[in-house]
Image (cartoon, rainbow, N blue to C red):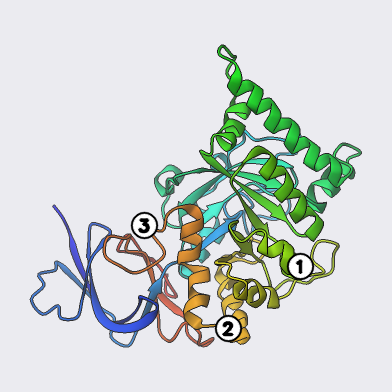
Amino acid sequence: MKTLILFKNGTFWIEDELKKCDVLVEDGKIKEILSDSSETEAEVIVDLEGKYVYPGFIDVHTHVGIMEEKTGNFAGNDVNETSSPATPGVRAIDGINPFDPGIQEARNAGYTTVCVMPGSANVIGGEGVVLKTAGTVVDHMVVETPKKIVKMAFGRNPQWAWGNQKKAPYTRLQIAAIVRDNLMKAGDYMAKEEKKFDYNMEVLSGLLKKESVARVHVANLEDIETIKRVMEEFDVDYTLEHATALHTDKEVALSLKDVPVVLGPLNVAGKSFQSYDLTFNSVKILHDLGFELAIMTDAPVIPLQLGIIQMWLIDRLRLDRAEVIRMFTINGAKMLGLEDRIGTIEAGKDADFMVRDGDIFDAQSTVTDTYIAGTRVGGACA
């Protein structure tokens, strides 16, 4: 039997503006946006008078659940499989703890969808997964994406992680060589009519067949250029993650206009060879160049319950506020290939939204309720 829930009297963020209306939800999906719901027969009515309702936040780059919060030191940390600099066959899903406090705090703060990926110690880190932030069984929280996700990392992180162990890659030259070598091996594997099954090669073959996308950690400009060079050699779809220095060279940036870019975390100290170019101004510079940006927390680097602070600080750049909200919602959905399911409040999409007691740009406002598929899963009183 189908259940109809009417969310009534709220001020909803719809079509890039706040509108006073009602939203009818059926079996977890938004059925209809209503200006007059007086004749609607709903089994459940939720009165949102005085409340502001926004699409659930989406973070496309986290390590929540595999780098568990509040466990301390090594316990609960499965973010990097450091047996080899190339571990394409490991899967983030196999280490996620659905009871990680970071996941609970994420939904209480209005984050309804997250992408969880291995870390950046390895050149090829393994497969990521997209989850809704509510549930007790990880497999039931998974949101299937059109393309699989393969984490990679260029630059200082893998160089430091392995060089400190007196193992290759010692240099960023070798990082690029490792990627090339593995993709060439995957090409040879694909070309064999008879072959012994190799899951690592199957994962990399997905990149060459465009069934997967490489999500590439990077900071410095020279590494961004190397990524562009390598990915174009093998015709691999990819995204730039962090991209700390991309805004520093408009010529390079404009050459990457068709590449999705995920910025962040932005409110951390810029005191290393990777982060000395870190600035909130990169959001405005790249936005003005035409990029559709998504903003990450890299949780738990910034815990997801503090992710909205980045929105408030970006707001100081005086961008169109609709564009800023898109950076935390629909732009991330597009990068995951899920824009037809999440990211906005509209008919046919998942009923995932946050309810606030004030405007989202008001730092004194809080999330009173978070809904996933029309069910309350969190909020200030959860």
Identified at 49% across, 53% down, the residue is 336
Q: Which residue is mark 3?
A: 340
Q: Foreground: 378 or 227?
A: 227
Identified at 64% across, 35% down, the residue is 88
Q: Foreground: 107 or 85?
A: 85
Q: Secondary structure at mark 1?
A: loop
Relative to 24, residue 74 above or below: above
Q: Which residue is mark 2?
A: 315
> x, y (%) of residue 142?
44, 47
Q: Secondary structure at mark 3?
A: loop
Determine crowd level at label 2: few under 14, some 14-19, many 20+ residues with C-alpha closer than 10 A: some
Q: Is residue 9 visible?
A: no
Which circle marks residue 249 in the picture? 1
Disc 1 and disc 3 in contact, CB within 8 angstroms: no
> x, y (%) of residue 35?
19, 80
Mark 1 or mark 3, which is nearer to you?
1
What amino acid type is highlighted by mark number 1? Asp
Relative to 216, residue 16 above or below: below
Residue that protrudes farthest toward the right in the picture: 166
